[in-house]
Image (tube, coloured by chain):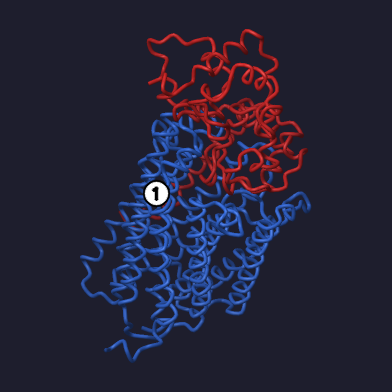
């Protein structure tokens, strides 16, 4: 396996940054887990640690998408990238912006008063979940994404080979960029604030990102088992169709209790209940296509691709649908049930997607035919088993919380500190298990293709 | 179905649903202001302070946020303002076991934050968070409440105090309080809490009538665990 175009190597820069942020995300995640038991455990408070945990996640996935996209666009267009220097510039601009933002969060954590107003916006932390990055950084991120999109579109225009995969991939990325904008304005009403905030958060993870996932799934099935383009592209269109048909109005399941009109209970309840269907279709697609095609060219890549489809359905689909009906959500909203869903959904839908893309494309980038795949399987099982138990732990905590706090009327702090204590302890232990898996993956990422002598042994 | 048909279905179908979504958004935006009180300058300043201290990094509001600390949507309805203000400015002075750090919130900022939280408590949230059904039902069926018990409920004492496992954790537990204090202590304490408990964050209940203070005190004095068994 080798790459056809030299500029595809740029994907590796993005992957490396993504992988490093991944390990940072999991490390701070464990600190946060310990703070549930012992709040004063670290020199930074929980809010700073959690901001780092979720922002590292969002950024490393985005950076992973960018790397994967540069690779796919060049491959599908059968040409070099329009401008490699621009891609490099865009990469380093992203790294510098993100590093500055992280330093800002830490400074704000140590000296909350440093989060001053500059031109009407906060200097270090906007204080809005997931999109904590201050406005100046938002603008830098938008510029970076625009440069990235420009480079991709110009590459496609060089040969004008508009394949379905790159059409849907770029469509998803443009949708992603557009949906970042509703989060970039200040509104006085907290209700409107949360209303627009969900445009960003929901239409990313249950809209644009799933479209990207659908197109990358098609690409990976072609690369790992040589599936026919005609077939995988048709599946892809049906999948992304249903993602948006259910997902756009499915946003309504976030508009039940935030001060919005009652009709959202109907809209959100009906459409979000249908959201697992396209995810189930992706699982079916992965299995069916694999069965029909016998020549597996990249076993590890296929392994992660299929796992991605399965856990996308379980985490985002099943763990979401259990509490999506308003009758249920009234009791579970804002409890650890949501935390459980979020962990398995992000792991299944996007963490495994980026890792799958890395295993599908990295061997070609490094120019190796075969590589020792034992670490890839080891890390998969460490991560997956730990995450599944982590999620079961959080689900248990959420059920206890829903029953004791919401139904019986016990105090939040009493339930958290006393009745859920063992769940927190177990969660921290499974977190360490997950970290071991990530550690093995990171080692494998850096060593892959560089120890060919042992590979044959 | 050909790939081209599938592609067109994807593009135009998605646009169709997005247009419906935008129409619902426009309709919602027109209705939101009627479902919430007016936003004064203080409420807005409070929201700015909410963002400044990254409160969402631990708390939830309207159920969205970090699940590490209690939801703030209706907190201003449940707990006295005097208590909340002291808490915001120095949580551990109010409750040494508090997880919340002292963030350096000024007295003025605390007032603004309370104005903001009072605003959120009055937003029509379609009945969320729901009233705990078991706690509401407990003790009501086939049992006459004493005057003191009624006052304990109507004043919302259980927002901070716990009794037999039900109630808040931020103020002292009351299950056995009848064995520890006498009548004079209770009456004096209700009128001026900090004269009896240094640094107490409990507001004064001087405004209660003499009879009401007596009723509440009688109830407190009846709280003796072995008698209840």
As drawn, A384 above or below A321: below
Which residue is depicted at the point 69% across and 48% down?
B103
Q: Secondary structure at mark 1?
A: helix
Q: Give A299 or B172, whichever is nearer the viewer.
A: B172
Q: Quadrant of the C terminus of chain B?
A: top left
Name the chain under label 1: A
Q: Could you say where residue B74 lies in the image, as x and y percent from the top left?
A: 58, 30
Q: Give A111 or B5, whichever is nearer the viewer.
A: A111
- Residue A422 appears left or right of A261: left
- Chain with colour red in the figure: B
As drawn, A125 above or below A216: above
| Label tally | 1
Q: What colour denotes chain A?
A: blue
Which residue is depicted at the point 33% across and 59% down?
A309
Res A180 visible: no
Which residue is depicted at the point 50% across and 49% down?
A203
Q: Residues within 10 Å of mark 1 (few under 14, many from 20)?
A: many
Q: Could you say where residue A213 lies in the image, as x and y percent from the top left?
A: 41, 60
As drawn, A119 above or below A228: above
Q: Could you say where residue B4 lies in the image, as x and y percent from the top left?
A: 38, 57
Q: Give A132 or A292, whichever is nearer the viewer.
A: A132
- Residue A366 appears left or right of A195: left
**What residue is disc 1 on?**
A423
As drawn, A160 above or below B192: below
Give the quarter of the image for residue B160.
top right
Give the quarter of the image for residue A41.
bottom right
Q: Give B117 or A224, whichever is nearer the viewer.
A: B117
Res A184 visible: yes
């Amino acid at each position: 396996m080798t790459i056809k175009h030299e500029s595809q190597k740029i994907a590796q820069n993005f992957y490396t940054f993504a992988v490093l942020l991944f390990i940072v995300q999991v490390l701070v995640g464990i600190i946060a887990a310990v703070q549930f038991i012992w709040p004063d455990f670290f020199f930074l408070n929980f809010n700073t640690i959690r901001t780092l945990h979720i922002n590292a996640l969002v950024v490393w996935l985005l950076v992973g998408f960018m790397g994967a996209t540069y690779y796919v666009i060049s491959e599908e267009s059968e040409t070099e990238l329009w401008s490699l220097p621009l891609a490099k510039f865009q990469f380093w601009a992203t790294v510098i912006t993100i590093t500055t933002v992280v330093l800002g969060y830490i400074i704000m954590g140590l000296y909350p008063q440093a989060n001053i107003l500059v031109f009407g916006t906060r200097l270090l932390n906007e204080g809005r979940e997931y999109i904590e990055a201050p406005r100046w950084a938002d603008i830098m991120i938008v510029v970076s994404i625009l440069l990235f999109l420009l480079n991709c579109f110009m590459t496609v225009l060089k040969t004008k080979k508009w394949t379905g995969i790159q059409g849907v991939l770029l469509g998803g990325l443009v949708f992603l960029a557009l949906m970042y904008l509703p989060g970039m304005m200040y509104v006085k009403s907290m209700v409107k604030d949360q209303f627009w905030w969900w445009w960003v958060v929901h239409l990313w993870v249950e809209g644009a990102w799933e479209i990207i996932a659908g197109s990358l799934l098609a690409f990976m099935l072609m690369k790992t088992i040589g599936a026919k383009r005609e077939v995988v592209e048709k599946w892809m269109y049906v999948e992304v169709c249903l993602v948006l048909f259910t997902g756009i109005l499915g946003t309504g399941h976030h508009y039940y209790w935030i001060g919005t009109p009652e009709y959202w209970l109907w809209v959100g309840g009906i459409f979000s209940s249908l959201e697992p269907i396209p995810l189930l279709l992706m699982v079916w697609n992965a299995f069916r296509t694999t069965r029909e095609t016998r020549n597996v060219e990249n076993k590890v890549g296929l392994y992660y691709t299929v796992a991605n489809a399965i856990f996308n359905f379980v985490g985002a689909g099943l763990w979401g649908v259990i509490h999506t009906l308003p009758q249920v959500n009234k009791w579970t909203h804002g409890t650890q049930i949501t935390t459980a869903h979020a962990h398995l959904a992000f792991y299944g839908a996007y963490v495994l997607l980026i890792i799958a893309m890395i295993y599908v494309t990295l061997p070609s980038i490094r120019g190796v035919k075969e590589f020792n795949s034992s670490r890839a399987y080891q890390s998969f099982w460490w991560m997956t088993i730990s995450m599944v138990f982590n999620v079961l732990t959080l689900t248990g905590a959420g059920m206890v919380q829903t029953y004791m706090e919401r139904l019986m009327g016990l105090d939040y702090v009493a339930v958290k500190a006393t009745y859920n204590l063992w769940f927190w302890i177990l969660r921290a232990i499974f977190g360490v298990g997950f970290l071991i898996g990530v550690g093995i993956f990171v080692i494998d990422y850096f060593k892959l293709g560089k120890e060919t002598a042992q590979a044959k042994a | 179905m050909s790939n081209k048909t599938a592609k067109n279905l994807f593009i135009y179908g998605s646009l169709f649903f997005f247009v419906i979504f935008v129409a619902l958004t426009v309709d919602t935006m027109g209705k939101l202001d009627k479902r919430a009180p007016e936003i004064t300058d203080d409420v807005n300043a409070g929201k700015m302070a909410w963002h400044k201290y990254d409160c969402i990094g631990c708390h939830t509001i309207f159920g969205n946020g970090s699940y590490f600390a209690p939801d703030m949507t209706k907190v201003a309805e449940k707990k006295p303002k005097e208590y909340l203000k002291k808490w915001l400015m120095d949580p551990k002075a109010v409750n040494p076991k508090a997880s919340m750090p002292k963030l350096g919130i000024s007295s003025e900022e605390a007032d603004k934050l309370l104005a903001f939280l009072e605003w959120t408590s009055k937003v029509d949230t379609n009945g969320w968070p729901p009233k705990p059904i078991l706690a509401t039902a407990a003790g009501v069926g086939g049992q006459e409440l004493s005057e003191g018990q009624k006052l304990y409920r109507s004043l919302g004492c259980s927002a901070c105090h716990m009794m037999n496992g039900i109630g808040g954790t931020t103020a002292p537990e009351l299950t056995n309080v009848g064995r520890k204090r006498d009548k004079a202590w209770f009456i004096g304490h209700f009128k001026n809490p900090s004269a009896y408990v240094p640094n107490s964050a409990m507001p004064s209940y001087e405004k209660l009538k003499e009879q009401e203070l007596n009723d509440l005190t009688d109830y407190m004095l009846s709280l003796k665990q072995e008698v209840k068994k």
